[in-house]
Amino acid sequence: MRIVDVCEVTKPISSPIRNAYIDFSRMTASLVAVVTDVVRDGRRVVGYGFNSNGRYGQGGLIRERFRERLLEADPASVRDDAGDNLDPHKLWAVMMRNEKPGGHGERSVAVGTLDMAIWDATAKIAGKPLFRLLAERKGREADPRVFVYAAGGYYYPGKDDTALRAEMRSYLDRGYTVVKMKIGGAPIDEDRRRIEAVLAEIDGRARLAVDANGRFDLETGIAYAKMLRQYPLFWYEEVGDPLDYALQAALSEFYPGPMATGENLFSHQDARNLLRYGGMRPDRDWLQFDCALSYGLVEYLRTLDVLHQFGWSPSRCIPHGGHQMSLNIAAGLGLGGNESYPDLFQPYGGFPDEVTVEDGHIVMPELPGIGFEGKSELIAVMRALAE
């Protein structure tokens, strides 16, 4: 049993949308395939992965550093203890060989992308859905029912309040009970009007979360907090720079409702510093670490260990990214749910074709691996890369 090839291609996921900080007109993503010599049900086992939206493709790093390390590793040294499957933890260590600690930069995204593919291959070799494999390894019962919310509400050329309301109404029609919109890309009075338009549209049938995408300084973040606290929001997300823990801590004095952050923290050390210094409250706030951006599931397990040390439950984690990898982690390890992009970043986001949202939840299908094979448009793109 061995990895015989690692393939990568950079794909566009461009869109004219923007949040408070960036536009997506030139956004890309890396799609990778980890090819093994194992055959299951007459087909060679190939694991697939891709990086989450918001960070560009990582082809250079993957091809120049991490691909060669995986292919050069002694196959016997990266198998599990039983010798009949890959060991993602050993393969992660191979990828990170000769890498200095700290200064995570973009390599966390490159490693997270490959880690996704490695776990997909591992679960396929085991003949199990990844969420069930993870639950078994943790000695817990997997729950295939996962909470999901609809992320959207971006700024878009020519998009007025009528179009924004129609977008949010479409999410309710598809079964979502929590929706999210962007703020901070317009003056505060305009954002107030947009928020009130959405609240009028959902009219108690769903909850609203708002996301500033790290745009605000402390003064602006406080001004928004004072405005937002009059509304029954699901959360107030990523107020300022993700590494400005003092700013995040200060906001808790002005905003008593739930806050959320973490999607732009890329290691368990970053998570520890957020919990030490960011004033996050385990009874109401939410953590959004995205494994595909932060060295993958191997590192995410370390992050969950940090949460446990600080008295946080995994159920307070709702990862960023809207991808099936986090869905499997949520179902297998008991996270609070996952983000979803019903209309954006396709074909990479969303669920297998037969999966529908009911009362804000989906039920994981019993597909080996991460379940990409159940999403017809996505698996066609993936197989074109390596099969």
Image: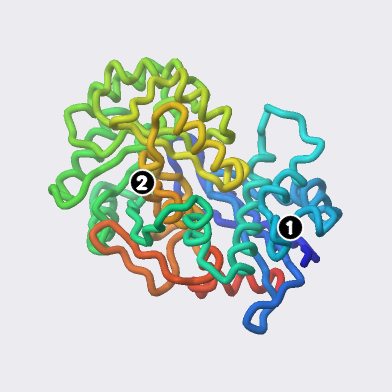
Q: Observer-nearest residue: 301 or 10?
A: 301
Quadrant in which the C terminus is drawn? bottom right
Q: Residue at x 65, y 50 (%)?
A: 57
Q: Observer-nearest residue: 59 or 101?
A: 101
Q: Residue at x 48, y 49 (%)?
A: 321
Q: Observer-nearest residue: 272 or 11?
A: 272
Q: Position of residue 226 (x, y in %)?
A: 24, 21
Q: Position of residue 94 (x, y in %)?
A: 77, 46
Report crowding for label 1: few under 14, some 14 to 19, many 20 or more residues within 10 A (C-alpha). Answer: some
The answer for how far apart the CA atoms under marks 2 and 1 are is 31 Å
Quadrant in which the N terminus is drawn? bottom right
Position above or below: 280 against 7: above
**Picture quadrant of residue 340:** bottom left
Q: Which residue has dot 1 on it? A: 79
What residue occupies the far bottom of the structure in this picture?
A: 42
Q: Residue at x 25, y 43 (%)?
A: 208
First in sequence, mark 2 or 1: give its number.
1
Q: Which residue has dot 2 on it? A: 336
As drawn, is 25 to the left or to the right of 209? right
